[in-house]
Image: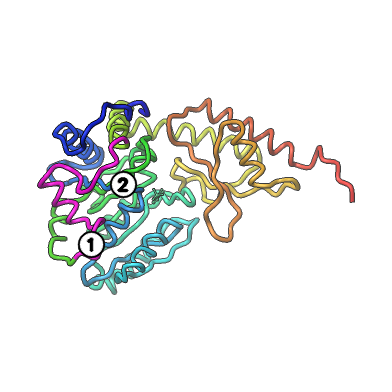
């Protein structure tokens, strides 16, 4: 996939590059919806640029209700705040499933004030998979449009936009699609996109309707695209098609299973109950061992070819392990052996302590 970036010099305004863009956008749409009713809009930037594009472009006079059960839900709120957008924060526990009943009750009273609900699918902070299907059904009942940040689920967890009632789905080139970083994208219902026409733009580069319109008229991105990232993305899409999304999720799930079994054997506990795990990224409670230190553990694993993440949840001592990308169960076994060695070394059993 990385070699796909090495191509002869090309002007991204040439016809050939237009074909590549068309292939990329159509294929991304087809992973989750029909190309008849949905369109993919590509934006040069990281995933947050695409999230910002949606949040800043869909709000007119009514409010966006944003479900906050982790750092990425909070980020959507911060975007709304930065633009002075009318938003309602629906605060939920970061470690328990979203209470859809209380969401329904809230909407019984206030749905007339709300035009959109925004939710993160896989809350990457915790590894908690949110029930977008249930939330989509609630949105349907109240005539509200749903925005889903599927950054860390797209390409692995199967999603059907039409059935799930998702108007805007947001992801990027570099997570489960296993491509290079640099492209964020929005897959959206065409009717929803058209309805944005009369909303006065709050920004320039990121305005969703302007980007959509430009793409329709020209079959190109509105501004200079990250050319190499798009070549890599085309290859990454082909690889995803070959593996298929259910196939990829099965591979990830197998690795997750092996990982959590191994972690349990090492006496480690999880932040979120197993049945709610996304099977893509796992939050682990830091062990209470005398010599334990996250940085030391990270450096030891890193020196041996594995990169792990610190926790991102305020006030909880956790670290995170992702099992995505071109890896397999053997990699997980190798990782677990190294982790066992590290934890054995800091458990205190073989440390001489002098007071
Ligand atoms: C990675 C991620 C993002 C976007 O992060 P960028 O660094 O801007 O690519 C947004 N939401 C979720 C849920 C993510 O996992």
Give the left or right position of residue 339, taking residue 116 as reference.
right
C-beta proximity under 8 Å, tags 2 and 1: no
Label 2 or label 1, whichever comes before in sequence order? 1
Classify residue 57 by image quadrant: bottom left
Give the left or right position of residue 350, taking residue 55 as reference.
right
Q: Residue at x 49, y 32 (%)?
A: 255
**Residue 153 vertical placement versus 244 (above, below):** below
* C-alpha distance separating marks 2 and 1: 17 Å
What numbered label is drawn on residue 312?
none
Give the total of numbered labels.
2
Magenta residues?
201-228
Name the residue tied to disc 1.
58
Helix, strand or loop under label 1: helix
Quadrant where the N terminus sits is top left
Q: Position of residue 244 (x, y in %)?
A: 31, 30
Q: Residue at x 34, y 70 (%)?
A: 88
Viewer-nearest residue: 21 or 91: 21
What numbered label is drawn on residue 184?
2
Q: Is residue 60 magenta?
A: no
**Residue 137 vertical placement versus 163 (above, below):** below
Classify residue 4 by image quadrant: top left
């Amino acid at each position: 996939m990385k070699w796909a970036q090495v191509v002869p010099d090309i002007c991204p305004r040439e016809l050939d590059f237009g074909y590549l863009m068309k292939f990329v956008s159509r294929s991304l749409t087809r992973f989750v919806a029909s190309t008849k009713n949905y369109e993919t809009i590509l934006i040069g930037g990281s995933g947050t640029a695409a999230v910002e594009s949606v949040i800043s472009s869909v709000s007119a006079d009514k409010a966006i209700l944003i479900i906050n059960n982790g750092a990425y839900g909070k980020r959507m709120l911060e975007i709304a705040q930065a633009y002075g957008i009318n938003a309602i924060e629906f605060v939920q526990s970061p470690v328990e499933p979203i209470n859809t009943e209380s969401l329904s009750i809230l909407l019984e009273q206030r749905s007339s004030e709300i035009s959109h609900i925004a939710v993160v699918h896989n809350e990457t902070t915790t590894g908690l998979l949110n029930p977008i299907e249930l939330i989509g059904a609630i949105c349907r009942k109240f005539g509200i449009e749903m925005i889903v940040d599927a950054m860390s689920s797209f390409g692995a967890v199967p999603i059907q936009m039409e059935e799930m009632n998702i108007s805007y789905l947001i992801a990027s080139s570099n997570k489960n699609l296993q491509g290079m970083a640099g492209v964020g994208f929005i897959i959206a219902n065409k009717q929803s996109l058209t309805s944005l026409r009369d909303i006065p733009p709050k920004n320039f580069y990121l305005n969703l309707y302007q980007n959509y319109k430009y793409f329709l008229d020209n079959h190109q991105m509105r501004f200079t695209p990250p050319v190499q990232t798009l070549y890599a993305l085309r290859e990454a899409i082909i690889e995803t098609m070959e593996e298929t999304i259910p196939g990829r999720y099965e591979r990830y799930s197998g690795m997750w299973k092996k990982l959590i079994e191994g972690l349990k054997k090492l006496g480690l506990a999880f932040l979120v109950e197993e049945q709610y795990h996304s099977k893509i990224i796992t939050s682990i409670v830091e062990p209470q061992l005398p010599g334990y230190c996250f940085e030391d553990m990270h450096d030891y694993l890193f020196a041996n070819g594995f990169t792990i993440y610190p926790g991102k949840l305020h006030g909880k001592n956790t670290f995170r392990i992702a099992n995505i990308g071109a890896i397999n169960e053997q990699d997980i076994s190798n990782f677990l052996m190294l982790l066992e060695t590290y934890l054995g070394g800091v458990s205190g059993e073989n440390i001489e302590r002098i007071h």
